[in-house]
Structures are given as structure tokens and as C-alpha cells.
Amino acid sequence: MRGLTAKYATRSGAVTAVDNVNFSIEKGKIMGLAGESGCGKSSLALAMLKLLEPPNTVSGEVYVGGQEVIGLDGASLRDLRWRKASIVFQSAMNAFDPVHKVQSQMAEAIRAHTNISTRDLNRTMDDLLRAVRIDPKYKKAYPHELSGGMKQRVAIAMAMELRPQLLIADEPTTALDVVTQRQILILMKRLSREHGTSMLVISHDLSLLSEVCDEIMIMYGGRTIEIGGAEEVVRRPLHPYTGLLLESIPSLYEKRSSLRVIKGYPPSLASLPRGCHFHPRCPYATDECTVTPPAMTTLDGSHAAACYHPRVQ
Amino acid sequence: MVNARYLVSRAIGSLVTFFVVLVLNFVLPRLLPESPAQILASNARLPQVVAAQLTIKFGLDQPVYVQFEKYLLGVFSWPPNLGVSYSFYPSSVLSIILQRLPWTLFLVGSAVFVSWILGTLLGIAASMRSRSLFDNSSLVGAIVIYTFPAFWIGLFLLWFFGIEFRIFPVFGAFSTSSTGVLSFLSSAGLHAVLPILALVLANFSGYFLLMRNNMINVMREDFVILERAKGVSDFRIVLNHIARNAMLPVFSLLSMNLGLVVSGAIGIEIVFSYPGVGYLIYQAVTSHDYPLIQGTFLVISVAVILMNFVADVLYGYIDPRAKP
Amino acid sequence: MERTPLFQLDHVSVTYRRGALTHQEVRAVDDFSLDIFDDETVGVVGETGSGKSTIAKVLTRLENPTRGRVFYKGREMKSLSAKSLFNFRSEVQLVFQDPYESLFPRHNVRKTLEVPLRLHRGGGKAPSDSDVAELLDLVELDRSILEKYPRELSGGMRQRLSIARALAVHPKFVILDEPVSMLDMSIRAGILNLLMRLKKDEGISYMYITHDLASAKFICDKMVIMYLGKIIEAGASGQVLDRPAHPYTMLLLDSIFDLKRPGQLLELPEREELESSMSLPRGCHFHPRCPYATDECTVTPPAMTTLDGSHAAACYHPLQESRSGSRSH
Amino acid sequence: MIKSSDITNAFSNKKLLSGTVITATFVLIAIFGPFVVSNPVQPALDLAYLPPSLRFPLGTDNWGRSVLAELVWGSRISLTVGVVSATAATLIGTLVGLVAGYFGGIVGEVMMRLTDIMLIIPPLALMILLAVYLGPSETTVIFIIAITAWPFIARTVRSEVLTRKNRTYVHAAKVTGVGTREILFSYILPDILPVVLANAVLTVTAAIVAEATLDFIGVGVTSIVSWGEILYWAQQSAFYYNAWWWILSPGLAIGALGTGFMMIGLGVEEITGHR
């Protein structure tokens, strides 16, 4: 993905939700995307499959298995979607059409992309459901008859049904119980390993991403501010935001009487500060931070950050 | 399967409503300062003696509870006894209504069906091009038509198509000169065109406005984005997902509106002298035929209550979430 | 001598009717008994649907229990007169989870804080500006936001305002219903620190309701673990976290993602998905997911049994060893 | 929430602006028109069925009366009946809706059921039945329309109250110690006022049509000429004389006034963000 930019048309002018983001995911690897609400991470997911409707605009290039997405239109875009790249949304609650049975919603994408006999289709669906640990009898159920965890499993089964090269999961477990959450992430990791599917997992929970992902990317105010191997980012963060955030999270494995605090509040995309978006909250900010946004600089192998004062240890 | 409890609760609701209608129908004439018989007599310009005789004949000299018992026994006997009409004497109220009922059902039934389909299709079309010229003009058009009384739309159509251009017949439900089944049917069809058109014009805009609104709301739902991500064709997304969901509240409106439409047909039937229940009410009102007025009210109410019940039950099948 | 608890919950159950058409009964809280004293901060930990928010509503009389009784300072809450209920409101306050929903959008910051001040301190008279400003200082909000409306504030500021509103009446006890779960990660620590400071400086006790064990450990002295409407384990924070007795507590601890956890591994025993929380399992609610379940677990729900001082669990097969040691039962 | 920006919005809202202009025009005609145009009670048979001309801009009826004059005088009835009955229906409906929505228990339940029952009974049929037994008069018509229109308002208000009474900020107010009356009138009612207002205005449209329909059927006001009554008489003989003007103008007047009110209602809904 190169220079992806997504803009929302609002009443008070265009708002840049995703600003010149670049990254790549290797085959079979899981990339984690972390960021707070309104940092543009969900817009990025939509933009990658060109799902933002006009008047919102997407520019840049996205390659899935060598095929460019943003330049596509109409039938060729429809053909690429789901077959090469699929998506799982945050709230499986709203991602199902309430008036259709699970099986017809699962069958829809398969039917749209392949010529398959009804018998094969049924077998495929049963296999998929078993793979996500759901009794195939539930394919005759309506979405509201499933629990949140089951819906999310079905959503993942659905996203895997055409064996895509890339699966984008936008907060796939946020609404779920801790236990279910872990079960579903284990499932996703297993599917990724078994089928060589690359995944982009979006979450606000860094501790979750650090366990699940091979690489982690941090976004702040629509821009990438840090990217690198999961271990490196969590153990040796370069960007002050990442570092402070990691220190502010309470842990079960240590006793503290007070937590490290990041002053101020996250910015809204509609009124971003000049220069580095994080500078008003940054303890290390200098004059140059307030003027020009720092570029992404590789500091340690594949570990890069956009900061004038990276915390190299 | 629709839950039996749901059926029972709806049935009880309908029965309670029916009972309220029964009581209203009984109490209203008796709430007046003058006795019904006196009103009957004065309106019919009959001498005072007749009023006294009427009082006894209708049992109005008896205590209220006895009258109520008699009234209920009449309604619940088979065939129901709704009294005898003055203006069509000696025909029973029930027989007159039963004679007229099929015409109203035919008229209202086809009008409801056509306006529902028309409003829904137009609503889908307008929502597809939201804020376009087509959308805006159909919106304004629907609002303007909505505010005209149904009967006036009927009058206008009658004048334009029936009198100026003489394309359609304007009086009654069929031509008395028609012989044979085919010619009767075609004549009945021709006679119904203008009344149905008037009813459709007066009623489709409600469905149109609701459908358009719902479509625009459903389009914003997450599952629509997911359908697009799946690579499903736009045509299929619009019809099978957006329209399908947007239709559910429209169906509720359909059952809500049955009462309005049956009433609305009264004006139209008067304009076209269409021999339905609505026109019968008019005749009953102008000839002060009180048993007939009450009888028609009862029958219309029962018809609407029944239709609502059926619509409620059907809704349980249409929206999977309404099932347990 | 026995102390009178601040709150005493005596076999409390709350049942909802769900679905206008089906009249299905859902038991949100089931046979819940707990004593809460005014000098300790107790954490109620549970997942979505465990009934923990219902407890908050019962304790603030937003809801009445379907069965069982709730006592406040020895008096049954249901029978509080209008006047004593009003006094109760000046002693016990509630901070809600959702900072976007809990503030009335029509009231600006000043008005939001003036309402409790007028009712409880001014005897109906309009409170002075300095009272309002003091409250803002207390929760570290800038005085310049006085005329702003909630929609102009960020989530973190709104939650601070909610806390200020609760503090306006000088409460002794504040129930915090997931106060940071809807906030951005970078501002949670600030709120948690604020809560700790208020606990220390103002002498307020909390009931801290959460699904996040790590923040509960930070705030709470005692902990109560809930599963599907029932208490399954209770005790001092350290006891519960270091030596969990109930298999569910153990599963919960194993499932949590924690940056500072030694030797992380993602694996977890796979179990079949729960059919639906609408129909509760018989016996111990946890038995369908429990690796140690035996026949007796499927029949009668186990009672709370004391293990060690204040540490108690409702399980026929409590785990014995500490978490750092080898696991067995 | 009504803010000053809403008022600026209101004037940039095309629906609200055009609706206000139309309605205001009719109100001015109803108030001042009768001072300009004389009361058309005097029949002049030699002037019957005259098409529109300079002297009679909208032609004459079967008694030779100016249709324009009838329309101007009739506007008073349409407006009064429409506004008064809609106001009454709104007051009843809002009260019932508030109580039925906010309070559970027997009172709320009974009110809910009563509303549901009233919603099913076909309104025009009920209106006719009531009109027949209560006798024709302006007050009767207003009463009848209010009686049949309130359940629609009550249903809307009830559902709006239901979505609000369990909002977290209402719970928060309760916990703070705010009393029930203050919650109802300071927290819930102001929030649903725009919906109530919009529905009240839409009810005026329905009431104007209902009044005309009752007159047309012959059970409405008979002492004063109203728009519906012009049509009642017109339908008896206008077609024989091809007096289309006699039918056209009253209908257009009803439609225009109705559209005016409806535009106001839709505009209010639009700017307050409901719907």
C-alpha cells in the first residue's frame, strides 16, 4: 500500500481521515493496527477496499496480490472484493442483514463469485462453520438468534469462504467477552497459518495486538507514527506516544499507586494541530515539532517512527 | 412458526377493540338528551304518537341493561340481527350491508394494493437518486397530493376523465345494460378505474414518503457496506437487502392505514355513486336511517379490526425478529 | 462488635422480561448476597451480561429487586420515604459508563453541576459560581469550559464532568459503573489516578464495576467476581488474583491480554460456544465451560464457601494452589 | 433542543419558509378578508353559474354567489376548526402519551390499551357516527376531530417518551435527586417538543381535510358556508352546468392550506433532526 489518503466530505470542508499511509503485509503474516477513536483506523480499512462512497475520496495505491484496487471500478472491483480481500467488521451485530438466514448471507458471496452447485455450496458452508467451531445447524438461524461471539465466528467464516489473500478485521473482538475474545483471536491466527492468509487486525488494545500480531503499526491523527515488529514496538517503542501509552496501561503483574498519564485529549480529525499531531501532548516536543510533521524514519531494522526525538534505547 | 402466545394476545386485543366498538355503538344514541325514538320520529317527521309506538317497538322503554342484553343477543345471533332499515324497509340492515360489502372490498382492496406497490416502487426509485430533481419533485408532488381530500381528487378525476373527455363511466359500479359474465366484468372494471385511481392518488404518498425515508436510513447500515465488500451486485443489494428491510415499517403502516382507507372510500364512493358501504353510509345519513348508520359503523369496524389482525399475524412471518 | 454494613444485599434477584411478544424471562442477577462496608473499595468484576450493571441500578434504587432485600445502613431500601431517599441520594452517587449518554445534552457544564448543588446544598437556591468552579478544580477540568455543552467536550472531559456531578453532593460512597471502558486508552490513566486521589483526599469509598481486572487491581481493596448473575468468588484483591479458587476466575485471568505478563502464550483450551445466555444452564452456571465439572455441578448450584479468611468461592472443586505455582485442584 | 442557530436554520429551510408564507397568507385572508369581501349570503339567481370574470374572479355558484367571497368567509371555519381541533388533540395526546409512556403500572397500561383501541377504529366512520348523534355545529366538528386525532399524537409521544425514559441522563438525574415532575417537564418534554409540534401541525392538515370531508358528506357545519360545504353543494349540480370553477377553487384552497401546514411540520422535523 502506497500513499493511501482518504478524505471525508463534511459540511465544513474535506476532513483527512487517512493521511499518506504506507505499509505492506507479507503472505501469511498478521499486521496489527493500533490507534484511538478517531485516528482514522476504521477509515483505512474501508479505504483499502474502496468502500468509501463519493463524495468521500480515496487516493493512492493498494495492491492485493499484485492487483491494484483503488484504480478499479464496477465489475472488476466487485470481482476483486471478497475473492482477494475480505473484511470483518467491529460489530457483528450490525454486519448481518436481520431479515435473511445465516446460510443465505454466507452463500451470497460464494454465488456472486463462483458457479457452484447447491450441494457443494451446502457442504462448503458446513465445513466453514465447523472450522470456526459452530454447529452447522445454525446456518438455518437468523442473525438475532445467535450470540455476539457466534456472530463474530460466522463473520470470520464468511470472510474466509473464498480463501482471500488478505483479511481486514476492524476491531473483531471489541464487543465480546474476554474469554470469547481470546478464543476468536486464536481461531483467526490458526486460519491465517493454515491458509497463508495475510491479515490486518485493527484494535485500540495494544496488549491484544502484541500477542496476536507479527507486526504493529500505530496511527495518530490519521498518520502512521510508528511501525515495526510486534515485540520491538511494545518492548522498545520509539515514538513518545507509543511509549507513554504503554506505560499508562495498568497491569495485573505489577503494583502501582499511580499511573503514568498522557496530558490532554486525543485530537479530532476535523481540527488537527499543525506539525506533528502529537506535539501538544508530547513532553519532548520542541519548536520544530510544531511546524513540519516529521517523516517516517527507519531506525532499527524494520522498526520506523515519525518523530524528531525518537526514544532510542 | 409464529408463537401461539403472540396470536392469542393479538386476538384478545382485537376482541377488546370489537367490544369497545359494540359499546360505543350502543351508548352513543342513548347519551343524547332526547330519546332516540323522539329523534327518529322528529327526523322522520312523524307525529308524536308514532314516537311513542317506536319507543315500545324498539324496547326503548325498558331498563338500559335489558336493552344492552337484547342488543348483544342480536349481534351475536346467527345471522346477526342488526335491526331493520327505515329507508330500505323492510330489508334488514345486515342484508343491505352484505349486498354492498363486496363492492367496497373490491375497491379498497385493489386501491390499497396498487398504492402500496406504487408508493414502494417510487420510494425505492427516489431514494436511489436522493436529492436529485426526480427525488425532489416526487417529494413535493407527494406532499401536495397528500393534502387534498380524497373526495376532491375524485371530483376532479370525474370531471376531467368522465365529463370533459368521457373516457370512463362515472356513475355506479357497473352498467345495467351489461349482459353475460364477461361484459359484466369488463363494465365493473371500467367503472372502478376512476374511483381506484382517486384512492390510489390519495393514499400512495404515505407509502412513498415512508419507503423513501427507510431506504435512505437502511443504506447507512453496516451490513450494506459488508454486502458491497462481498462483491455482491448493486442491484441485488438494493432489492434483496435494502428494500427488503425498508419494507418492514411500510408493512406496519399498511395495517395501520386500513382503517383510514376504508373511511377514505366513503368520500370517493359518494362522488362516483359507487354502491359500496361508504355510499350506503351517505344514504343512511341523508335519510336519517339510524339502524343502518349504526349497522354500517359496526360492520366497517369489524372489517378493519379483522384486517388489522391478519396484518399483525402476517407481520410475524415477514420480520424474523418478531418471532420468538 | 459487629459493624453495620453500609449496604447489605440479601439474596437479591432481578428478572427482566425480554421481548414484547415472547415474554421471555431473563435473570440478570441471581441470588446475590453481599455486605459492603463504608471504608473499603470493592470491585465487582464480570463480563458483558454478568449482571454487574444491574447491581449498580439496584443499589441506587433505579431498579427494585424482583426478589430479596437491600438494606442501606440497616434500613430496607424499598421502604425509604421520599425524604430519606433524598438524603440517601446525597450520600450515595453513581457514575455511569457512557460519558456520551449520561450528561443531559441540553444542560451546559454550569447547569449540569448546578442541579445537584441546588437540590442538596442550597436548599433550592441557586448555587454560587465559586461552588461550581471548585468542583471543576476538583476533577482537574479547566474553568473556561463553564458555558460549554457536553457535545463540545471530549469523552475524557465528559467523564470528569460526570464525576464532578456525583461529587457535588459530597457523597460518602460512589458507585463507578465501568467509568473508563468507553474512553480512549491515553486518557484512562488520568481518570484512574483522579479516582485514586479522590479516594485518598476526600475519603470516598467506591464500588468499582468493571470487566478489566487490571484496573480493578489498581483501585480496589476487595473483589467480587460475577458470572451470569451470580457471585462465584469474593475476597481481598490480592487473594483473588494470586490464588483464584474458581475455575472461571482462572480462565478469565488466563484470557486477559497483558503487556507485562511473563511468558505469554495465546493458546487456550477450545470449548464449544455457549448456546445462548438467554437460557441459563442448570446447577453451576459455569459447568458447560468448566474443565473440572462433575455430575454434581450440573444439578445443584454450589454455595459460597469460605476458603481463607474473607476469601470465598462458589465451587465444588476449588483450585488450591497459587497462580505462580503449579496449577492443580 | 431549540437554539438560536435553529432559528437561523429555520429561515434557510425551504420547507419551513414556504409553509409559513402559505399559511400566513391564509391567516391574513381569514382575518382581514371578510372586511374586504361582503358576506355571500344573498342569493341572486340571475347570476348563477357564471364562469370566472373580473366581477367574480372565481365565478359564481348555483345561487349566484361569488365563489371567491365564499372561500374568503369559509377560510375562517377551515382555519379555526383545523387549528383548534389539532390543538385539543395535541394536548390530550401529549398528556396521554407522557403518562402512558413514562409511568408503568395500571394507569399507563390502561392508557396504552385505550390508545391502541382508538387507533384501530376507522376514524371517519367514527366521526360520522358521532356527528350524526351530536348534531351539526362548529363545536361538534372540533370535538369529533379532536377525539379521533389524539390517539395518533399519543402514540408518537408515547414512543418518544419510551426511548427517553431509560436514557442514561434521565437515570443520572434521578440519582442526583431530581423529582419526577422536573424530569418529565425539564428533561423529557423539551426534548420531544419538536416532535409534538411537527405532529400538531401535521394534524392541522388532517383536521382541515376531515372538516371538509364531514361537510361534504353532509354531517358537518350547516349554518355557515365552509369550504367542504361549497363542495357539497357543488357536487350536486356543478357538473350539469360544467361549472368546473365551483369545484376547482375550494379543493385547491384546502390543498394549499394543508400543504402550508404540512411544509411547516416537515420543516420543523428537518431542522430539529428528528425523523
Image (cartoon, grey):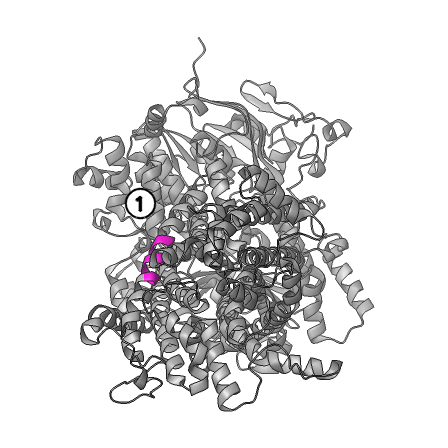
Q: Is residue A52 visible?
A: no
Residue D84 in the magenta stretch? The answer is: yes
Q: At 54% from the left edge and 72% from the top edge, which residue is drawn? A: B269
Q: Is residue C134 visible?
A: yes
Q: Is residue B41 left or right of residue A154?
A: left
Determine which quarter of the picture holds residue B170: bottom right
Determine which quarter of the picture holds residue D42: bottom left
Q: At 29% from the left edge and 30% from the top edge, which residue is drawn? A: C170
Q: Is residue C140 left or right of residue B14?
A: left
Q: Which chain hosts label 1? A: D
Q: At 56% from the left edge and 73% from the top edge, which residue is drawn? A: B115
What amino acid is labelled 1 in the image? Ser
Q: Nearer the viewer, residue B319 or A58?
A: B319
Residue A282 in the magenta stretch? The answer is: no
* Mark 1: few/some/many CA within 10 Å (<14, 14-19, 20+): few
Q: Which residue is mark 1?
A: D186
Magenta stretch in the rendered image? D81-89
Magenta stretch: dominant secondary structure: helix
Q: Nearer the viewer, residue C6 or D139?
A: D139
Q: Secondary structure at mark 1?
A: helix
| Image coords of residue B179 (percent x, y) | 73, 83
Q: Nearer the viewer, residue C41 or C255?
A: C41
Q: Residue furthest top?
A: C1
| Image coords of residue A211 (percent x, y) | 57, 51
| Image coords of residue C178 (percent x, y) | 45, 41
* Depicted C260 relative to depicted C236: above or below: below
Q: Residue furthest right?
A: A119
| Image coords of residue A301 (percent x, y) | 51, 64
* Depicted A165 relative to depicted C212: above or below: below
